[in-house]
């Protein structure tokens, strides 16, 4: 499975940024938007799940950037844009979810007669739906408008916020939220939902470090390696949880109730194992 760690080298972090947070917004948003649009073009000729995965990661980064700039945005506009990015990311991720589920079945249910043809058929349908959603020009237009609207709103007041100060303050806020989520996950023993919330908080910190890396000190960047491990372990747990939900909702891809039950039991055991691994970081 390809992790989001491999995407960090493709991050839209500009080598030169302006002095204010307001003026620098497009320096961060435009490369990400261009990356999304490039993946949309690639998808039209290469319907591969990896293309959809890279598209989903770029959309998630745009959503994270909206959160970073929340203090400078109208709240209603920020929520509208993050909703748009999430909806598009979910559409891109549907095929990837089937790929993960199929891979997990191969890893955890080796003794189960898996209905590969039915699973691959479900994956093809998901891919067709994703390609259909992203084939409309309105998606590209909505993306461009979202970036332009955010830039206008951020610069409308004429305020000037020192970029280095803004980056440090948003980092502190993100790290505070992560600590809160990690404590909540530690208290909620064996709660995959709590771990997932901590994972999302960790991704915000990680993306923020990648966005503003050139502006931050070595001390501020130090947690990045730990965040990569959090993402790896918590993400592995989330893969199983998401696959359980997906396959639980689609018993028709299995030839019998017995095969379905055996597969779900195998995934449950794997979820418990990955939960133990994730819990060591709490």
Image: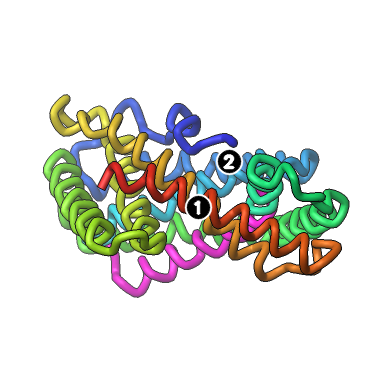
In the rendered structure, the answer to whether residue 49 lies left or right of residue 182 reads: right
Disc 2: CA contacts within 10 A as few (<14), some (14-19) or many (>=20):
many
- Label of residue 271 in the image: 1
Magenta part, dominant SS: helix
Report whether 12 appears left or right of 98: left
- The quarter of the picture where residue 220 lies is top left
Q: Residue at x 28, y 42 (%)?
A: 281
Decide: marks 1, 2 in contact (CB < 8 A)? no
Please name whichever residue, 115 or 9, is drawn nearer the observer in this view of the structure: 115
Way the structure is coloured:
rainbow
Q: Residue at x 36, y 51 (%)?
A: 199
Residue 150 magenta-highlighted? no
Quarter of the image for the N terminus: give it.
top right
83 in magenta: yes
- Between 270 and 42, the one nearer to me in the picture: 270
Residue at the spot x=45%, y=33% of the render? 5
Q: Quadrant of residue 232?
A: top left
Q: Is residue 42 visible?
A: yes
Q: Is residue 24 visible?
A: no
**Circle nearer the N terminus (1, 2):** 2
In this view, 114 is above or below 11: below
In the figure, is residue 29 to the left or right of 91? left
Query: Along the line of sight, which residue is nearer the eye, 112 or 57?
Result: 112
Percent of width and height locating residue 239: 54, 50
- Residue interval drawn in magenta: 73-96
**Marks 1 and 2, Cα distance to the nearest angstrom?**
26 Å
Crowding near pointer 1: few (<14 within 10 Å), some, many (20+)? many
Residue 223 appears in which quarter of the rendering?
A: top left
């Amino acid at each position: 499975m390809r992790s989001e760690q491999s995407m960090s080298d493709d991050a839209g972090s500009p080598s030169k940024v302006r002095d204010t947070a307001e003026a620098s917004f497009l320096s961060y948003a435009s490369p990400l938007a261009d990356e999304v649009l490039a993946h949309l073009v690639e998808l039209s000729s290469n319907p591969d799940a990896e293309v959809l995965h890279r598209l989903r990661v770029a959309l998630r980064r745009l959503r994270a950037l909206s959160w970073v700039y929340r203090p400078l945005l109208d709240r209603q506009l920020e929520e509208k844009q993050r909703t748009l990015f999430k909806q598009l990311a979910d559409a891109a991720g549907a095929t990837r979810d089937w790929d993960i589920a199929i891979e997990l079945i191969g890893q955890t249910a080796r003794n189960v007669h898996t209905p590969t043809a039915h699973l691959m058929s479900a994956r093809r349908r998901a891919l067709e739906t994703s390609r259909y959603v992203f084939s409309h020009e309105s998606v590209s237009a909505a993306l461009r408008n979202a970036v332009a609207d955010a830039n206008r709103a951020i610069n409308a007041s004429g305020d000037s916020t020192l970029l280095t100060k803004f980056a440090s303050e948003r980092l502190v806020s993100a790290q505070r939220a992560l600590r809160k989520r990690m404590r909540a996950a530690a208290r909620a023993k064996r709660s995959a939902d709590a771990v997932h919330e901590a994972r999302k908080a960790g991704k915000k910190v990680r993306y923020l470090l990648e966005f503003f890396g050139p502006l931050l000190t070595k001390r501020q960047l130090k947690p990045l390696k730990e965040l990569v491990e959090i993402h790896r372990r918590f993400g592995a747990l989330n893969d199983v949880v998401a696959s359980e939900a997906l396959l639980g909702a689609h018993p028709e891809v299995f030839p019998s109730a017995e095969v379905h039950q055996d597969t779900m039991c195998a995934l449950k055991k794997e979820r418990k194992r990955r939960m133990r691994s994730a819990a060591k970081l709490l």
